[in-house]
Image (cartoon, rainbow, N blue to C red):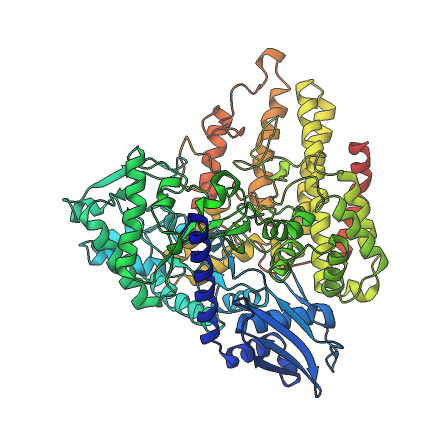
């Protein structure tokens, strides 16, 4: 059989097996319970009916019959997707991360003509490892329950599921001679576990309390039970040879090699040689323990050497690694399929795994072209969109709607495309992007972008006022326009470590630029949005969007302000420096107040949620330290650290207690320098590392500021506000009137 035909056959078999598993597991009551959770007052007006898949693909139908809205589907996920479609396009309501608008009429609208939607994609995956920490670390079951319902309503049927992995590791390592103290010392703190399962760190911000492990088992079981009853097939963790450095003590005979330190975070990590007999034994035990705790859907994430180099060079080693991972996994579970991220994939590892036993997750749809569509393996096209929970509005909406259909219909190059996915590092922002990406699960062709947007807005606000439509049409030309890609790299000087010349806040990030869009046009969009009708203004979704847009305007305004301040200093203009530095700090105060009007932007809630999980003062302090560290300096203090400010979040409390004090210290230092002779004044010389941001040990100021940052993380502080304060509409109007004249002066 020619290879292309053989690979295609394997892909079809995987798709059919996937769809059959869903059809056999249809749980009508699970679908009905979801309806009850989403629209509790309307359950009697809906009827759930099971129908077969359409040629192996998920399908849903919506129809009115005898005074009820009939939702048909081949799985609970299909039924939930039908519910979401009906609520959006017939009831004009929306549930989202950023506000809900659920103003339903007493009697549900009639569907005049039966709707039938068939997905072109067998698999719809969701979640990045990073999402579990940048967004989900402190989630309760109640918050997870909401998210799983959101997933089902947005067509997700193959989510990543790693909650409770620490217990799998504990049980596994106990069987290989490690004590509980040694295991807990190996396990990282709660906010860093995603990166541990990506095999790049160990031990930092720990040791992990046993209470956390026990809690995670309970939570992980609930998550998986709910996902499975809705017809999803979760991706669990596989074993790739990452082991504790401490395993050398209990397994001295094994070939355990040291891997380099990852981005100067913590110490080295260890890799068990896949050719060592211990590798197959540990794989078997790991999958046994995981299955005992959490069951299995036979899909295992395996991403060897993520963002790092193998401990042994050469093609033979890579081929052997792929072969041994496959053989050991299959020996532990004969039905196993390996789900492999493409972020750091290596061809020889991939090719060592049979095509019917692997699915490639192209996280940002960048790797398929350079790999001949993954050398014939089935794959999922995805979007990442966000890194670390950078808060900026943005993303090319037209490309989000166009990308998947373009790949689907390019049969010549994208062979074996078997699904799509959303793999953000963080969620809880830019809801329009995720609504668009997820709805494309049910479209084989790109919808008209503006028409789709107007439909989205009608559901988001319950109506579409002319000023609102005009405001969002302007956003479609700017923050959500075609000028940049799907991912957002639009940082503000506010969040950047202070310097005269600021390139960006985070590693790999960049300051926003007028090359992306006209900053001034966003102020016009604010003015238009403020002119919405009174009914629209009462919706929570509108209030979030208005605050978010004003936030983006002020975040962008800080960029030329900081540049003018630096210019005044370099030109020895004391009065101008005093004016611009005062203006810059004043903007930060208002920025913090604006963010405080919405729950989505509160540092205090993030810290309070972390502390609430602890059962002792020591646990609470550890969890708060984790929560503070992840969103600021990232890892433990190191003079060579480069991950600081990776999240660059624009949050109330974080601006006031972290970002502003840094800039105040820098401005005080510069003001003092201006009193000295020109040859004695502060100058920036070789302060940046390869990410164009000041190093911890660049000079005396950065040595001091980096230590201050580390102290801010390590010492529990007063929790800033945990609930929103202030009226969103009045606050936006106040700051628009105050700062728009300054914006005009700076932009023109």
Which of the pair 689/234 is nearer the observer?
234
Looking at the picture, how far across and down is residue 479, in whole percent? 71, 45
Query: Quick one: which residue is furthest to the left in this view?
Result: 253
Residue 209 lies, with reference to residue 499, above or below; the image says: below
- Tell me, yes or no, if residue 175 can be seen here: yes
Q: Which picture quadrant has residue 523?
A: top right
Image x and y of residue 394, in percent: 66, 46
Which residue is located at x 74 percent, y 24 percent?
575
Q: Is residue 410 above or below residue 174?
A: above
Q: Whole-percent x and y of residue 490?
A: 63, 40
532, 315: nearer the viewer: 315
Rendered residue at 69%/18% (across/down): 572
The residue lying furthest to the front in this view is 1
Q: Residue at x 36, y 36 (%)?
A: 309
Q: Position of residue 325 (x, y in %)?
A: 30, 50
Look at the picture and state if 705 lies above or below 460. above
Residue positioned most to the bottom: 66
Compared to 34, does 744 lie above or below? above
Image quadrant occupied by the C terminus: top right
């Amino acid at each position: 059989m020619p290879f292309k035909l053989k690979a295609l056959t394997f892909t079809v078999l995987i798709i059919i097996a996937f769809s059959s598993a869903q059809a056999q597991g249809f749980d009508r009551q699970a679908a009905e319970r979801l309806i009850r959770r989403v629209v509790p007052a309307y359950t009697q007006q809906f009827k759930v009916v099971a129908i077969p898949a359409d040629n192996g693909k998920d399908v849903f139908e919506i129809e009115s019959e005898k005074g009820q809205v009939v939702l048909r589907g081949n799985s609970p996920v299909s039924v939930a997707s039908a519910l979401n479609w009906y609520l959006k396009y017939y009831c004009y309501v929306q549930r989202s991360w950023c506000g809900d608008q659920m103003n339903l009429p007493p009697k549900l609208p009639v569907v005049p003509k039966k709707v039938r939607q068939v997905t072109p994609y067998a698999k719809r995956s969701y979640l990045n490892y990073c999402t579990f920490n940048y967004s989900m670390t402190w989630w309760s079951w109640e918050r997870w329950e909401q998210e799983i319902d959101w997933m089902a309503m947005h067509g997700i049927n193959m989510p990543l599921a790693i909650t409770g992995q620490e217990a799998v590791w504990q049980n596994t390592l106990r069987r290989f001679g490690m004590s509980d103290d040694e295991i807990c010392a190996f396990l990282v703190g709660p906010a860093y576990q995603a990166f541990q399962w990506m095999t790049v760190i160990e031990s930092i911000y720990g040791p992990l309390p046993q209470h956390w492990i026990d809690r995670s088992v309970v939570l992980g079981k609930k998550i998986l039970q709910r996902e499975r009853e809705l017809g999803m097939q979760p991706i669990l963790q596989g074993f790739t040879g990452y082991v504790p450095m401490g395993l050398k003590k209990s397994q001295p005979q094994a070939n355990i090699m040291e891997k380099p330190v990852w981005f100067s975070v913590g110490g080295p990590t260890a890799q068990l040689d896949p050719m060592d007999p211990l590798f197959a034994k540990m794989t078997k035990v790991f999958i046994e323990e995981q299955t005992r705790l959490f069951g299995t859907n036979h899909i295992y994430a395996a991403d060897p050497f993520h963002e790092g180099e193998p401990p042994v060079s050469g093609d033979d080693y890579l081929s052997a690694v792929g072969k041994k991972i496959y053989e050991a996994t299959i020996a532990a579970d004969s039905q196993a399929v390996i789900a492999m991220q493409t972020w750091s994939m290596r061809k020889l590892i991939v090719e060592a795994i049979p095509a019917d036993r692997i699915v490639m997750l192209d996280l940002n749809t960048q790797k398929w072209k350079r790999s001949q569509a993954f050398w014939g393996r089935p794959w999922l096209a995805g979007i990442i969109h966000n890194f670390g929970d950078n808060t900026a509005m943005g993303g090319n909406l037209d490309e989000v709607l166009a990308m998947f259909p373009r790949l689907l219909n390019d049969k010549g190059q994208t062979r074996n495309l078997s699904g799509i996915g959303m793999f953000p590092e963080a969620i809880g922002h830019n809801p329009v992007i995720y609504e668009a990406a997820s709805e494309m699960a049910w479209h084989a062709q790109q919808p008209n972008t503006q028409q789709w947007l107007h439909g989205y807005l009608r559901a988001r606000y319950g109506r579409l006022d002319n000023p609102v439509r005009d405001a969002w049409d302007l956003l479609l030309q700017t923050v959500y326009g075609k000028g940049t890609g799907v991912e957002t790299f639009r940082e503000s000087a506010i969040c950047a470590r202070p310097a005269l010349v600021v390139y960006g806040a985070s590693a790999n990030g960049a300051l926003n630029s007028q090359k992306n869009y006209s900053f001034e046009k966003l102020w016009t969009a604010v003015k238009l949005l403020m002119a919405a009708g009174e009914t629209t203004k009462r919706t929570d979704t509108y209030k979030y969007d208005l605050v978010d847009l004003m936030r983006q305007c002020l975040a962008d305004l800080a960029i030329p302000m900081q540049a003018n301040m630096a210019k005044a200093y370099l030109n020895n203009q004391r009065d101008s420096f005093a004016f611009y530095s005062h203006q810059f700090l004043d903007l930060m105060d208002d920025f913090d107040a604006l963010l405080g009007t919405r729950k989505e932007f509160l540092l205090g809630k993030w810290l309070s949620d972390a502390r609430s999980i602890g059962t002792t003062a020591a646990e609470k302090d550890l969890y708060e330290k984790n929560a503070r560290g992840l969103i600021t300096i990232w890892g433990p203090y190191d003079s060579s650290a480069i991950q600081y400010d990776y999240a660059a979040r624009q949050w109330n409390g974080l601006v006031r207690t972290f970002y502003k004090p840094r800039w105040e210290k820098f401005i005080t230092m510069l003001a003092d320098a201006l009193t000295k002779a020109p040859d004695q004044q502060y100058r920036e010389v070789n302060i940046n590392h390869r990410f164009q941001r000041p190093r911890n040990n660049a000079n005396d100021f950065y040595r001091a500021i980096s230590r201050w940052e580390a102290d801010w993380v390590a010492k529990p502080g007063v929790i800033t506000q945990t609930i929103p304060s202030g009226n969103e509409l009045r606050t936006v109007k106040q700051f628009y009137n105050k700062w728009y004249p300054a914006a005009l002066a700076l932009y023109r």
